[in-house]
Image (cartoon, grey):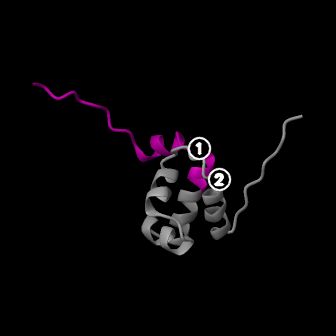
Amino acid sequence: MKKKMTKRRTKEAIKAELPPISLFVRNKREELGYTQEELAFRSGLSVRFLKEFERGKRTVRLDKVNELLHFLGATLEVKTRE
């Protein structure tokens, strides 16, 4: 059986597909020089949550997102459309 060849995507292509909030967290973490494990430990969140969040997986745990943003010195703002 032949293996199906898949095109490997570049880091830039992957990052371009991420939700802005996931990209913000990833960039801020890298700017601070933390690994995912370090940021998870320091912020009190699980490594699994952080990894999934940075990959853009949707989450219903807004409280965890808020905790993470608070640790990074950011806030989440909700705007209504008029």
Q: Position of residue 8 (x, y in %)?
A: 33, 38
Residue at the image position 28 percent from the left and 31 percent from the top: 6
Q: Is residue 6 magenta?
A: yes
Region of the chain picked out in magenta, as a range: 1-24
Label 1 residue SS: loop
Q: CA distance from mark 1 to mark 2?
A: 15 Å
Find disc 2 in the rendering and name its residue.
Answer: 62
Q: Which numbered marker is on residue 19? A: 1
Residue sitting farthest toward the left: 1
Q: Residue flagged by tag 2: what amino acid is it?
A: Leu
Q: Is residue 8 left or right of residue 47?
A: left
**Mark before the other along the chain sequence, 1 or 2:** 1
Label 2 residue SS: helix
Q: Is residue 48 above or below residue 79?
A: below
Image quadrant occupied by the N terminus? top left
Residue at the image position 63 percent from the left and 70 percent from the top: 71
Q: Is residue 11 magenta?
A: yes
